[in-house]
Image: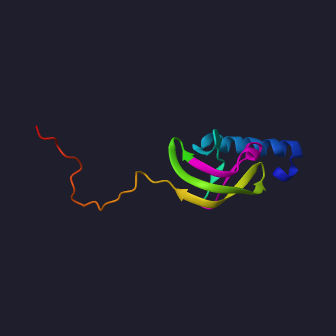
Amino acid sequence: MIEFLPKDIEDGLAKARLKAASKKTRLRVQSGEDMIPLVRLTSSNFAIERELAPRLRGLVDIYDGSRHLYQALVVATSFDGEAVVFEFKRNTATAKGPALDFVQEEDAPVALLPSH
């Protein structure tokens, strides 16, 4: 059915579809001070709106709401309709806490009570 629509209507539908996809997601990419909503995220790439793409390059942080998911080095690779696809050159998942420099026992207490 889309083959029979005029080009301007088809472009408008594509933009509306892209805008709806970016509003529904909590996924964001941060480059410097800019937070840009993601259209999609896969294990090897992500996509953002074409209008926001020129400001994005190099080392970025990816968030799900306020939770930091990844730190990645990215490069723009292709256009997918109204979106720009960025491939990961490096994609490192963030740790949930500081690195431990000792072995934790399985039966170790969660906390110690103070002695008075």
In-image side of 81 versus 23 (left or right): right
Residue 1 horizontal/vertical position (percent): 81, 51
Q: Is residue 110 visible?
A: yes
Question: Which span of residues is magenta-colored?
Answer: 43-62
Residue positioned 77% across, 48% down in the render: 82
Taking the view exactly as shown, the residue that stands out farthest to the right is 6
Residue 12 horizontal/vertical position (percent): 81, 41
Q: Quadrant of residue 77?
A: bottom right
**Above or below — where is 102 with respect to 9?**
below
Specify the color scheme: rainbow
Residue positioned 28% across, 60% down in the render: 104
Taking the view exactly as shown, the residue that stands out farthest to the left is 116
Image quarter where the C terminus lies is: top left
Q: Nearer the viewer, residue 112 or 46?
A: 112
Taking the view exactly as shown, the residue that stands out farthest to the front is 101
How many callouts does the rendering have? 0
Q: Is residue 6 visible?
A: no
Asked if the stretch drawn in magenta spans residue 56, the answer is yes
In-image side of 57 versus 29 (left or right): right
Residue positioned 66% across, 48% down in the render: 39
Q: Quadrant of residue 17?
A: top right
Residue 100 horizontal/vertical position (percent): 36, 57
In-image side of 103 versus 63 (left or right): left
Residue positioned 45% across, 54% down in the render: 95
Asked if the stretch drawn in magenta spans residue 71, the answer is no
**Above or below — where is 101 with respect to 4?**
below
Residue 5 horizontal/vertical position (percent): 86, 47
